Image (cartoon, grey):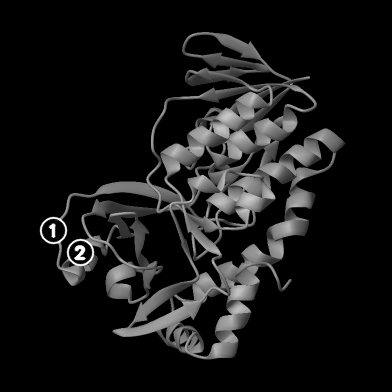
Amino acid sequence: MKILVIGGGPAGSTVSKYLANNFNVTLIQDKKWAKPCGGGTKTKIFKNFDLDTNLIKEKFNSLRMIYKNKNIDLSLLGDNLSIVFRDEFDEYLRNKAKENGVTIIYDKLIDIQKNTAILQNQQIDFDILIAADGVHSNVRKLLNLPDLPKVLTHYALIDKKVDKPLFYFDKLYGGNFYAWEFPHQNKTHIGSDYKTFINFTKYLDINTKHKGYFIPKWEENITIQKNNIYFVGDSAAQVMPLTFEGIYYAMESAKILAHCIINNLDYKTEWNKRFLKQFKFMKFIEKSMQNKFLRNIIMFGFTVPIFQKISVKLWLEKIKL
């Protein structure tokens, strides 16, 4: 069976690697580029997927939440948050897939005609096509599926170093979500909702050029399979609500999809078994944070040690919903 994967990020590379043990897998990567991303992920991803820990640029056992000029330091119960550089990380994953027998072609998808992908420079037949081509999924457009819900963020790298990840929850700086500062060795990756980015930079007392990027917003009714075409990672909006954590969930979702294809299981059913309760719970918190009164209550909760501990254990999946 021929499987064609569109997109060579964490989701596409991971699903390709696992499927190559059983099938003929070709991965199409449009071009080499660095995705605008803070690069934060759960450290356990390196053990779960047998990844080289040299990819970890920094590890953290705590983070800081800022709300109404109050600092809330949150213990992560160990070095459970790591920072990677996405260009290096993604290329490493593609190379791992290639070592496992995946054929990687740098080309661009133009059209899909029945079971044939029309690329810029060639045509490739497939039995299964997997779309791992991001929030602006070309495959979704070619199938006339609705655009993914998404939020526009602005981001920049600045010449400043913070000692731990910082999250700002005041609406003035982060809108309905949050603004962030992530350490990136000798620099800091900052970002926010596009409407509040200027407010955030004024608060930080910096003047910097910025770029924009859309982050998908998960909803329960998003199509993740249409006949023999599957969606995974950002193209399926498999990004945790509120936190917008994507790397871990992209790779875990890719592993689920590979398992389903190999064992002829229903993809949505298996994904729901693993993640639906977590995503629905975080979606509820995300919506609650848009209410000023509820946001105050939630942020006050993070000042309570037992609430902090339970929250981190939920994040680490040591407590199941």
Viewer-nearest residue: 161 or 299: 161
Query: Is 134 placed left or right of 177 in the picture?
Result: right
Q: Quadrant of residue 285?
A: bottom right
Q: From where the camera sits, is residue 238 visible?
A: no
Residue at 68% from the left image edge and 26% from the top image edge: 100
Check disc 1 and report its element: helix, strand or loop. loop
Q: How many marks?
A: 2
Question: In the image, residue 12 lies at what x, y percent?
Answer: 59, 35
Question: In the image, residue 196 lies at what x, y percent?
Answer: 26, 65
Residue linked to disc 1: 207
Residue at 13% from the left image edge and 58% from the top image edge: 207
Label 1 neighbour load within 10 Å: few <14, some 14-19, many 20+: few
Check disc 2 and report its element: helix, strand or loop. helix
How far apart in space, not on screen, are marks 2 and 1 (Cα)?
7 Å
Question: In the image, residue 232 lies at what x, y percent?
Answer: 62, 41
Viewer-nearest residue: 165 or 171: 165
Viewer-nearest residue: 289 or 251: 251
Query: Is 227 placed left or right of 110 in the picture?
Result: right
Residue at 35% from the left image edge and 78% from the top image edge: 66
Q: Quadrant of the N terminus?
A: top right
Residue linked to disc 2: 201
